[in-house]
Image (spheres, helix red, strand yellow):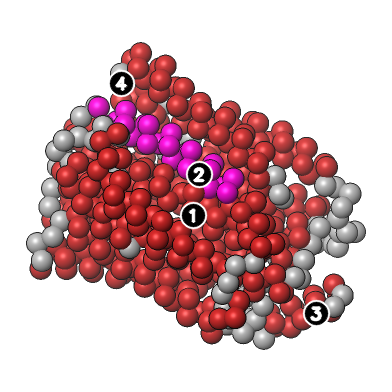
Amino acid sequence: MNSHVRKLRLQSHMHRGKIEQDFTSGPIFKQMLLFALPLMFSNVLQILFNTADIAVLGALVDDVAVAGVGSTSSLINLITSMFIGVAVGVNVIVSKYLGAHNEEGVKKVVGMSILLSFVFGAVLVVIGWFGARTFLVLMKSNEEVIGLATTYLKVYFLGIPLVILYNFLSAILRAAGDSKRPLIYLLIGGVVNIVLNVFFITVFNMTVEGVAIATVVAQGVSALLCFIQLIRAKGVVSLSPKHIKFYKKELLEVIKVGVPAGIQSSLFSLSNVIIQSSINVCGKAAVSGSAYAQQIEAYIYCAMHGISLATMSIVSQNFGAKKIERIKKIILYGLLIVSIVGISLGALGTLLCNPILSLITDDKEVIGYALERLLLICLPYVLCGVMEIFSYSLRAMGKNFLNMIICLIGACLLRIVWIELVFKAYKTYRSIFVSYPISWFVTVAILLVFLIVTLKQNKNIGETPEKEVD
């Protein structure tokens, strides 16, 4: 079947209301905005799961329970990031296949993703259950919170297959250009999470184990809804039982993208674990304040991350279609949107820190630590968004290993060196967080150089660009 016929079939699927969307033609800015906005809200809703845990524990239990849950976030990210990185690989490959009109390849990757998510989930259950306390001890967790943190981790990891499944299925929907359904499914899950948090704590007198169960159940609800959608879909991006098996060629392509993404994410998380270990030695108030600040930061990051994911999916489709000139415009629009979001939300998060946290805790020392962290991270947070636009664009164009090396040296390694040299010399809470804006700036500068080189290397592979309406 020639390329023209495949393209007509793909367009026919879309005109019949199927979930896949063609990003290789049409007005770029409008497409990006309509695709990115639901992704931004989806990411914000996903982090709402953890914020609900923190807020309910702070209001109904105490700050020790808050510190117990808050001290686990960097460790959870470290353990899960390698496997969730493979979901990024699924997103990129599905997007690229759609751009190249490779329908059979899309169906194979979708089916294979179900098996991958359960295999990875089973591995994580074992790691999380048996290694929870050991990992926390290595992180120098405070004695007051380590018991609660261990309980939270064990319960959370029993349900981790559902979390992994949701990440894979939502990545597939995003790759198809459908960002609205994951938003709806997460909204439903978010409501379930908040209701169950209050229910388990007030009715069953649970603490951290109750919020862990609520989080997992909520993610399971969202995953189930994604699964049902893919089963019912009749277009190119759909789930057929006959395709639920491993395919060597497609698996290798997913791994080629996903493993570097996972390694990069894991080592970023490792640097955050090291930073969390440094925070832990500053005392319980510092741990609680940092945990509260992380919740505010998470909303800002997730909004910017949604734009990065949108950019990656759209660049992937156009790279599959060999439209390099269009990719340049996509990246510029991505930078524009992420800059507006990062600057405005960074300032807003800093300004609202005191009034928001005053509703949850009356400990002035805890609020002071939270505000100090936000001043050092939120205001220059836009640099992190720019870094991700560059990084995800390189990943979408196949520069996976190069992208991984740049980000690890520019951000991860630099932070670790900073903690070993600067923090150990000064031992202050403030000195920990200065490393973030410095590492973002260095990484952005290096990524920009290689992104320009990559675009120049690929400028001759594209088709004659059509006239765009922006």
Labels 4 and 1: the sequence-earlier one? 1
Which picture quadrant has residue 133? top left
Label 2: how many Cα within 10 Å (few below 14, some 14–19, many 20+): many
In which quadrant will I find the N terminus?
A: bottom right
Which picture quadrant has residue 17? bottom right
* Residue 36 vs residue 416, the one in the foreground: 416
Labels 3 and 1: the sequence-earlier one? 3
Disc 3 on helix, strand or loop?
Answer: helix
As drawn, the label of residue 8 is 3
The residue segment tinted magenta is 259-281
Labels 2 and 3: the sequence-earlier one? 3
> Which three-letter amino acid code belongs to the residue tagged 3?
Leu
Do callouts 4 and 1 mark residues in contact (Cβ within 8 Å)? no
Query: Which residue is the site of mark 4?
Result: 428
Label 3: how many Cα within 10 Å (few below 14, some 14–19, many 20+): few
- What residue sits 12% from the left and 52% below the top? 61
Label 1: how many Cα within 10 Å (few below 14, some 14–19, many 20+): many
Query: Which residue is the site of mark 1?
Result: 84
As drawn, the label of residue 265 is 2
**Front position among marks 4 and 1:** 1
Do callouts 1 and 2 mark residues in contact (Cβ within 8 Å)? yes
Distance CA(mark 4)–CA(mark 2): 27 Å
> Which three-letter amino acid code belongs to the residue tagged 4?
Thr
Disc 2 on helix, strand or loop?
Answer: helix
